[in-house]
Image: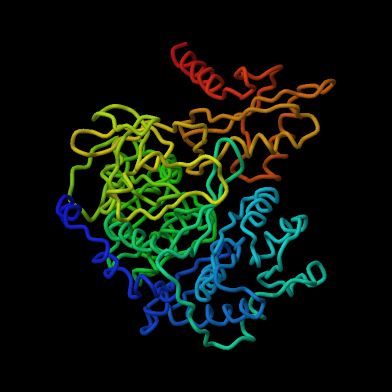
Amino acid sequence: MLNYQKTVQEFDLNTVARQYLSGTMQALNACFECCDRHAGSDAIALYWHGKDGRKEQYSFAELKKYASQFANFLKAQGVQKGDRVSGLLPRTPELIITILATWRIGAVYQPLFTAFGPKAIEHRIQLGQSKLVVTDLANRDKLVDIANCPDIVTVHAERQADAYPQDFSFWSVLKGQDEHCELEMLTIDDPFLLMFTSGTTGPAKPLKVPLKALIAFGGYMQNAIGLQPEDAFWNIADPGWAYGLYYAITGPLLLGHSTLFYEGGFNAESVCEIVQQYGITNLAGAPTAYRMMMAADQAQMAQLRGKLRVVSSAGEPLNPEVIRWFEQVLDVPIYDHYGQTEVGMVVCNHHALEHPVRSGSAGFASPGYTIAVVDEQGQALAADTAGILAIDIRQSPMMWFGGYEESRKSPFVGDYYLTGDTAEIHADGSMSFVGRSDDVITTSGYRVGPFDVESALLEHDAVIEAAVIGVPDPERTEVIKAFVVLAQQVQATQQLEEELGQFVKKRLSAHAYPRLIEFVTELPKTPSGKIQRFLLRNQEISKLQQAKTA
């Protein structure tokens, strides 16, 4: 284990870049870094476990061949350097092949979460100006009503040729291509991913991830995840989101390490099965999954005692009782990590770096980053004072985020990037998360912008106005609650409440729908007409506190 302070003091970006990348700052390709250079042996890149129990494995050499073939198909369709290719796929081999093929020709991969509804998908495809969408039969119907939808490649499209005669079939077009495809070299500042992040005042905002982020991804995998060559690694996060895409695919493959895709649902039975079948020693995911493990049959969970070497948690703060449970029941340390889509993981309790680890703290700034807590004017605050968590750009050579593609409001103030989260930095340099300083909702590890949910509700004929907040919940961190003003002559009923929830679920996403709905006659607003969500949130917190003391 390396000393944290020494690693921070000796950090040099060029030295670290050479540790993780074989290319240069002016000639780099993500497919080569994450696949080709590891393809000289029979090393396994992907273990795949299907939801029907089927199991397959793919070497780096096999992925290189398939990615080259699919890349040649993309080129034949006119996809060029800088173009966007969207993937609406579950955890299947076709997902990794699509990503690597996109990178191979210098194009940009855009993830689409499979729980998204048509509205969320359309927004991302149109704003991203995607040239091609790759999907499977289970998700194909979501693209039917997308305006100006680009060409579609569907896995096994031939099985429903009558329904989708215009679609390309993934394996059919891949196998018709040459197995050699030249790499398109890019610079360290060129994008290779296009991500979207939830906001409070508008739809999800796009941001480009440059190749420089690969260095940070490698650092996180090695220092915080503590990934060792002999580890069997499983990151349970969905690759339709940043944590899964950055650290279940890109990060491990960059290090030449295998990753695991389990396509089935995450439950007590599946976690026991997968950990034992594949000998998992290094596990990463969100607290929601870990709380589910705690709630399962303890005798069943005890089977995993001593199996895991380290566990990492990200997406929301880790509860102290989860930490205690993992220590007592599974005999394994579970460490909290903090990050964002915009910047990756920047504050961590590092498994591979020696520093104090205390319950309630997200840890210390990752090597290459300097954090601060500031006020809204960008003035640094004293230790143990709650304020906006910020990254000091001047003193963060690992920083790669340059701003949003479509946003009037800049997240930068002076030399700081403002995360939008409230935190405290202690005298020893460790950070404790306090909460969101805006209205973004964290539910089951997902960040949901209230604007998206409100917009979906307003599409229903019965709804005149809507305000959406997060209500504290012991299992999901927050659940989404909507306050709805109905049109005249519309009756507030239990049936309508259920209908609205399903309406949003279908239009937007399976995780971003209101589980709670309250019908009201008006919403609290500022004199200028802005909804004051914080008043609704305070009202709900007060109700919860009263219920506890009653």
* Left or right side of 167 for 441: left
Look at the image and tell me whether residue 147 can be seen.
yes
- Please identify the residue farthest to the top as the structure is shown: 550
**In the depicted structure, whether residue 12 falls above or below residue 317:** below
Residue 444 position, x and y percent, is 50, 41
- Please identify the residue farthest to the front as the structure is shown: 414
Q: State the scheme by which the image is colored.
A: rainbow
* Left or right side of 93 for 373: left
In this orientation, which residue lies closer to the viewer: 331 or 12?
12
Residue at 74%, 56% (x, y): give it.
146
Residue 463 position, x and y percent, is 75, 29
**Image quarter of residue 203:** top right
Residue at 47%, 11% (x, y): give it.
550
* Left or right side of 175 for 40: left
Residue 128 position, x and y percent, is 61, 57
**In the depicted structure, whether residue 21 falls above or below residue 206:** below
Residue at 46%, 56% (x, y): give it.
244
